[in-house]
Image: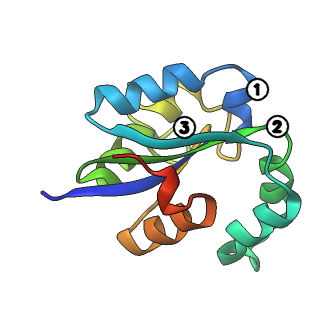
Amino acid sequence: MAIERTFSIIKPDATKRNLTGKINAKFEEAGLRIVAQKRIQMTLEQAGQFYAVHKERPFYGELCEFMVSEPVVVQVLEGEGAILKNREVMGATNPADAEDGTIRKEFALSVGENSVHGSDAPETAAEEIAFFFSGLEIVG
């Protein structure tokens, strides 16, 4: 499997509870390297643009409001099969369905407050990384 990069967000429910280090430890234990990272307070405009793919969905407004409710940590993870590996480490969107040991099983509060976001494909990873990071900010 090839070395690739993926995008990750540690969401407001997790930063509010000071779980950034514990979540990042899970990524690193799985063999993913954090090659770019910053803590930001997302604006409603940024959240709306980032989640525009969901604009027609009933949860869009609630999602955007949640994402601006506290700071988030945006980051780029790198490793062999990073996209799939990140999704495995995160666990199912619904924490009730997530496997033991996954981030969402251990830390998520609900389907909506599920602690992390991760890219689902190489194309979305590239778009999401470029949304928050310039090439100069990524140090592999």
Q: Which numbered dot is residue 5?
A: none
In this image, 112 relative to 25: left or right?
right
In primary-sequence order, the first of circles 1 and 3 is 1
Q: Which residue is mark 2?
A: 70
Q: Residues within 10 Å of mark 2 (few under 14, many from 20)?
A: some
Whether the residues at callouts 1 and 2 have beta carbons within 8 Å, the answer is yes
Quadrant occupied by the N terminus: bottom left
Residue at 53 percent across and 36 percent down: it is 96
Q: How far apart in space, not on screen, are marks 1 and 3 (Cα)?
A: 18 Å
Identify the amino acid type marked 1. Answer: Lys
- Helix, strand or loop at label 2? It is loop
In primary-sequence order, the first of circles 1 and 2 is 1
- Helix, strand or loop at label 3? It is loop
Q: Which residue is mark 1?
A: 16
Which numbered disc, 1 or 3, marks the residue closer to the eye?
1
In this image, 71 relative to 108: left or right?
right
Q: How far apart in space, not on screen, are marks 3 and 2 (Cα)?
A: 21 Å
Residue at 76 percent across and 76 percent down: it is 55
Quadrant hosting residue 98? top left
Q: Which residue is mark 3?
A: 95
Identify the amino acid type marked 2. Answer: Glu
Identify the amino acid type marked 3. Answer: Pro
Judged from this view, the residue extending furthest toward the front is 136
Residue at 31 percent across and 38 percent down: it is 32
Q: Is residue 83 above or below residue 41?
A: below
Q: Nearer the viewer, residue 52 or 110?
A: 52
